[in-house]
Image (cartoon, helix red, strand yellow):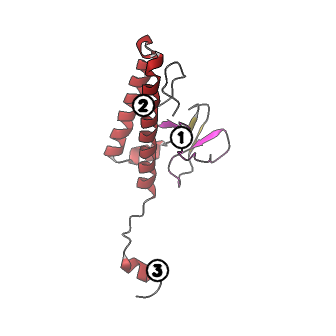
Amino acid sequence: MTSLLPGEPEGHHDAQSRTDSGDSAPVIAARGGPDRIPCLVPTCSCSAAQSRFPGATGWICAKHYKGMPPEIKRRWKQLNARSRKLNRLGKKNSYRYGDRQRQWFRIDRIYARSWHALDLAIIHYFTASERPVGIEEFLKEHGLV
């Protein structure tokens, strides 16, 4: 995610793209070359052109976006709506004063953490094992049952 600070370029946040804020969030290595953006799902081989989503480090392919549960889609749409609202506010002169700079930095940090948490939830949803892990499974794996 690009910065939400007033006067800086507006980030591109649509229903399927994500950009990195430069915080401690891990940057996903591109599959398919340096000019490609990988799908957030680690097991997916889909990628998009960097020119399609400038500055993005990850995106959700259509297959995985359709497969997301409704609560994750709802949060995704909520964060996108907030992004549009914050970008509109950042363009207004009344929000460009220096005394608001700390507020913008704080909003930017909170917003970046929210996107990062959503990215982790998406990755966990698609990579979590559906088998329950318990003592029985452990014993079977080691041939003790």
Residue 130 versus residue 144 in the image, above or below: above
User: In front: mark 3 or mark 1?
Assistant: 1
Span colored in magenta? 15-44
C-alpha distance separating marks 2 and 1: 13 Å
Q: Establish if 131 lies above or below 120.
A: below
- Disc 3 is placed on an element classified as helix
Q: As shown in the figure, which amino acid type bears the numbered disc 3?
A: Glu
Q: Amino acid at mark 2?
A: Ile
Badge 1 element: loop
- Residue 14 visible at all: no
Task: Compare marks 2 and 1 and give the one earlier in the sequence.
Answer: 1
Q: Position of residue 130 (x, y in %)?
A: 38, 64
Nearer the N terminus, badge 3 or badge 1?
1
Mark number displayed over residue 23: 1
Q: CA distance from mark 2 to mark 3?
A: 47 Å
* First along the sequence among labels 2 and 3: 2
**Main SS type for the magenta part?**
loop
Q: Position of residue 128 (x, y in %)?
A: 42, 60
Q: Secondary structure at mark 2?
A: helix
Quick one: quadrant of the C terminus? bottom left
Q: Is residue 67 visible?
A: yes
Residue at image location 65% in from the left, 46% down from the top? 32
Residue that badge 3 annotates: 141
Q: Which mark is residue 107?
A: 2
Pointer 2 and pointer 1: residues touching (CB < 8 Å)? no
> Is 39 part of what is drawn in magenta?
yes
Near-viewer residue (91 or 55): 91
